[in-house]
Image (tube, rainbow, N blue to C red):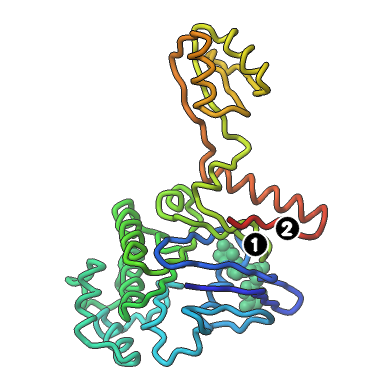
Amino acid sequence: MIEATGLTKRYGSVTAVDGLSFTVPPGAVTGFLGPNGSGKSTTMRMIMGLDAPTAGAVTVGGRPYTGYRRPLRAVGALLDATAVAGGRSAVSHLRWLALSNGIPRARVGEVLRQVGLATAARQHVGGFSLGMAQRLGIAAALLGDPPVLMFDEPVNGLDPDGVAWIRTLLKSLAAEGRTVFLSSHLMSEMALTADRLVIIGGGRLIAETTVDALLASGAGNAVRVRSADAGTLAAVLAERGATVTTEPDGALRIAGASVDEVGEVARVRGLGLLELSQQRMSLEQRYMELTREATEYRADTASVPATRQ
Ligand SMILES: Nc1ncnc2c1ncn2[C@@H]1O[C@H](COP(=O)(O)OP(=O)(O)OP(=O)(O)O)[C@@H](O)[C@H]1O
């Protein structure tokens, strides 16, 4: 579990993180989203004790990261995959990390196999591709078998196989009961990987919610229906208070009624249906809508509405 309470970081006149409170629970993948410069990396650095908060606090497993004598056993993190000395081999890099954290040497071989780097174990890290460096960073994060894992843009530069591999790995780590916290700008990937989301903008919380709840709450969600009796169906639905528009292909787009309600109205009136489906905004569309709302709200009132579910 990661818990931030009133977390704040100022760099001179820049407030990078502004009174941020959120929880990352175990047993789920929680995505961390926000526009460029919204404070995600700064927040992750404070979680890892690499930067001290100006105000507020963040704990991992109930205590600050810096309170752990062997931190790799408490939290594994991939923050910058390229931050490994290039002259070392993968195996010597991991052995050194294991030694300094009281982790058995045998664990090095295990994690190298787990990330698919066993055959490259003795190669110099300087010659690694970005994908191999990402895998090595993940091996280092897994080394101490920690209950909490954090990944900053883990799929950056990976090919589709690598992206799918990380998705499966993160989900399986969460299924084992670990806390998994993940930042990424790839919305389609986030929609497939994350169960929950913490969304920030301008250093402040915009929403803390599940992916399902966020998608269900989109203003652009609607029901699409095609019927040979579209005119009658549209009139009946409008009478019941739904907003009905006609699409270029003759289908009706209905806001303010569920798929079940539309289906029931058609059944009762004996109107044949050719198609009936729920239209949902993508995570990307919903995220853009939400961050835009928050920016406009902030411009109006100088404070951001926070949704917690
Ligand atoms: N060491 C620093 N000194 C001064 N300002 C900083 C420092 N680190 C971050 N900032 C500023 O704090 C704000 C938040 O930056 P941060 O890197 O945390 O955002 P981010 O959400 O991770 O962005 P990105 O998505 O681009 O990685 C930015 O305005 C940035 O310029």
* Mark 1 neighbour density, 10 Å: few (under 14) some (14–19) many (20 or more): many
Q: Which mark is residue 205?
A: 1
Give the residue type at disc 2.
Val
Please indicate whether residue 171 sits to the left or right of residue 115 in the image.
right
As displayed, is residue 265 above or below residue 37? Answer: above
Residue 241 is situated, as x and y percent measured from the top left of the image, at 68, 23
Describe the element under mark 2 as helix, strand or loop.
Answer: loop
As displayed, is residue 250 above or below residue 193? Answer: above
Residue in view at x 61 percent, y 80 percent: 57
Whether the residue under disc 1 has CB within 8 Å of ligand 1:
no
As displayed, is residue 62 above or below residue 159? Answer: below
First in sequence: mark 1 vs mark 2: 1
Q: Nearer the viewer, residue 113 or 242?
A: 242
Q: Which residue is mark 2?
A: 304
Instruction: State the quadrant of the C terminus.
Output: bottom right
Please indicate whether residue 10 sits to the left or right of residue 146 in the image.
right
